[in-house]
Amino acid sequence: MTDTETQIAQWRGYVQRRSALRNVDVEELEDHLRGSIEELVGSGLQPDEAFLVAVKRMGALDELSREFAREHSDRLWKQLVITEADPATGSGARRDLLVMIGCATGAALSFKAPELFGMVIDRNPTFYLPNLSLLILPWLAGFLAYRRRASTAVIGALVALFALGAVAANAYSFTEQSQSLVLTCIHLPIALWLAVGLAYIADDLRSPRRRMDFVRFTGEWFIYTVLLCLGGGVLTAFVAGIFTAIGISPENFIGLWLVPCGGAAAVVVAAWLVEAKQSVVENLAPVLTKLFTPLFTVVLLTFLVTAVAIGAGIHVERETLILFDLLLVVVLALLLYSISARDPLAPPALFDTVQLVLVVSALAIDVLVLLAITGRITEFGATPNKAAALGENVILLINLAWSAWLAFGLVRKRKPFATLERWQTTYLPVFAGWAWLVVLVFPPLFSFL
Amino acid sequence: MKLTKDLVAASATPMVLGILAEEDSYGYAILRRITELSGGQLDWTEGLLYPLLHRLERLGHVEAYWQAVTGERRRKYYRITDTGSAELAEQRRQWDTVVATLREIWPGASFALPMEGLA
């Protein structure tokens, strides 16, 4: 039987190299293999024959690990086995690289294209600011749609969404001081980013796991973009320094070409990096979440206790509103990120409780803010800013309140983790809907204030 | 007999839940039971069974626990949960409707009841 043990050990080593299979899965499969061998030996085969037959019966490992990968797509995040193992796309990585370069160049050029029609970045802010995302994000969506081999229906929907965005950004006439202009500049990128999400999930529109992958993608994309911008900053500093040293002033080149074109291209390059090189920083976002969840919890709890102790109300200025909205966004991001990185099968742990405390204290603070805003609106009437801030607050409040309830169920082991995950992925279209509402309906509603 | 992929996918969940409703079990035994109950007609692969079990676990329909067997080895057992039982009952209602309808459409056909594996 020792021969069989060596063979099984070899088999185990071979199977463990599959990234879609974890050690516990291998253990489960090994138990299966042994059951199969025992039965075959019982029916009269020699142990080594039985081993061969049992392995053969288990079927091709490629197919097995692909089936595992389909169920555990979060593990695939390490390396896209499904697309890479596809024999038809042997030169796929190279073609992706070429398409990425094409899209990045396209983004950089279309950013400069309006100059042909006399629009200059620093002189026409009312054109450039709302149109910024419209000039760049279609290229990103195009790159993702290409990678996902999006269907004609999805491509049609993408074209329609970006056309709608173009209408929203340009059909209304804003003055430089109007609040609606600022709101459009903030909300149109959000609306269009979720359109990019549509391109991202184009290969499987209904799957909640795919949407969670998009949430992961967003976080990793953000990290990569920040890294690229830091690198770009170093490059820019050197360009400025060395050319000044020989008496040439590169300021115009930097301001009008290097920074805008580099930034536009970085958006696409970051997405390509996330898609191609996921394993490099794959653990960064979860680690950041683990670190900052307890810290934010402490800060929020201290704030609540202090605010109650000194009996202070919240002063509602425009900046405060935005600040507290951003706080909710950060809390939601911490929640979403740890959800997306959490092992769906892990039992509830201390971290889940900390997270619950974080969400509940954010909710408590938000109730204070909501009371303050509603008071202001009933007293002085609505402005686009206040209405948008209030709406966002309510949307985030609903999301966090229900998340808190689900997290409570998770901590008490009443609900499986999947319900919390599904709630977040189902809620994503609500954010998109609200962003479109602000962009399309708010300006006429508040008579372009 | 080779069933179509769609039919296998649709019937696998109620079959696994039904087997686990009888008693806790583990992968190899579930596969043996399926083969036995279908008289060798259904031949599931591991690539079908284990991802399915893991999905049911993620959805909270089953729970897993490890139990020691001979020596240092341990085995992963699955147990049906309350939501799993509810899901089984619901799937059973749906299958009853499908089977009853097919019986009406094919009168007189001797129906090897596909639900027998669930009883």
Image (cartoon, coloured by chain):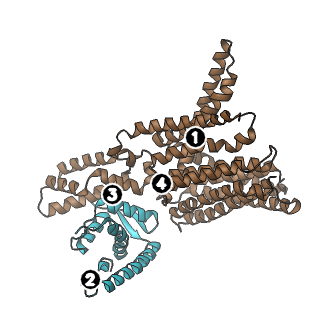
Among the two numbered marks 4 and 3 on one chain, the one whose residue lies closer to the N terminus: 3
| In contact (CB < 8 Å): disc 4 and disc 3 | no
Q: Amino acid at mark 1?
A: Ile
Q: CA distance from mark 4 to mark 2?
A: 44 Å
Q: Is residue A374 above or below residue A111?
A: below
Chain in brown in the render: A
Q: Nearer the viewer, residue B104 or B114?
A: B104
Are the residues under badges 4 and 2 in a single subunit? no
Please report, as a chain letter, where disc 1 is located.
A
Label of residue B111 in the image: 2
Q: Which residue is mark 3?
A: A28
Q: Which residue is mark 4?
A: A152
Q: Are marks 4 and 1 in contact (CB under 8 Å)?
A: no
Q: Which residue ends up furthest to the front in the rendered image?
A: A117
Which chain shows up in cyan?
B
Nearer to us in this view, A150 or A19 = A150
Say whether marks 2 and 3 touch (CB < 8 Å): no
